[in-house]
Amino acid sequence: MEIGITPSNPEAFEDDWVSLGQALTPSVKHMLDSLASQASDLVWKIDRDVVLGYLESGGSAKELSELLDTYAADGVPEQVRTFLADMTRKAQACRSSEEALLIELADVESAAEIANDSRTSKLCRLVGTNEVVVRKRNLKAFQNALRKMGYVLPQ
């Protein structure tokens, strides 16, 4: 039984295979199926998109590494470990998300004034040259601060 990597980047990780040395239990096979695409009865291809989906749903690359460490007959190749470490690092790079509103201003000067004014600077961030982004939870306070500056945000 072998596990292969099919990367998004074809020149990376070509022909990296991990030979599994023991039969898989149904629960291990199920976990492997959730991390890879089964290519044949004995071969799963670890696909970056499948692993990303697994990580997005709360799984961890550590679980996959432990699975491979447990079942690999000849050890896990360094390129596979590098692949998983890279996936883990990237999966943890985005820490949180929150809804926000991107507001386009008529000119650079207005955007700079709004982004740097003491009443609004804690509520928004300048994006590019003439846009600010405001977290939805700060929108009401931002609108009130804009009014005090003489600006209005159309509904």
Image: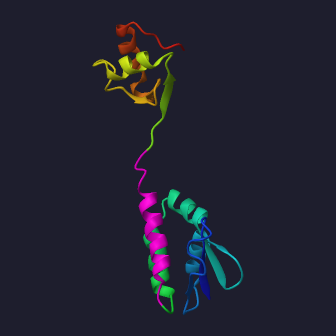
Instruction: Reply above or below: 41 against 61.
Output: below
What is the magenta range? Answer: 75-96
Q: Residue at x 45, y 66 (%)?
A: 86
Instruction: Reply above or below: 111 against 10.
Output: above
Query: On the rendered structure, is 69 left or right of 43?
Result: left
Residue 133, by quadrant, is top left
Residue 75 point in image, percent of width and height: 47, 88
The C terminus: image quadrant? top right
Q: Nearer the viewer, residue 81 or 12?
A: 12
Q: Residue at x 57, y 81 (%)?
A: 16
The N terminus: image quadrant? bottom right
Q: Nearer the viewer, residue 25 or 63?
A: 63
From where the camera sits, is residue 141 visible? no
Q: Nearer the viewer, residue 101 or 15?
A: 15
Query: On the rendered structure, is 127 left or right of 36?
Result: left
Query: On the rendered structure, is 120 left or right of 15?
Result: left
Instruction: Reply above or below: 6 against 122.
Output: below
Q: Main secondary structure of the magenta part?
A: helix
Query: On the rendered structure, is 127 left or right of 155?
Result: left
From where the camera sits, is residue 78 visible? yes
**123 within the magenta span:** no
Residue 132 point in image, percent of width and height: 44, 26
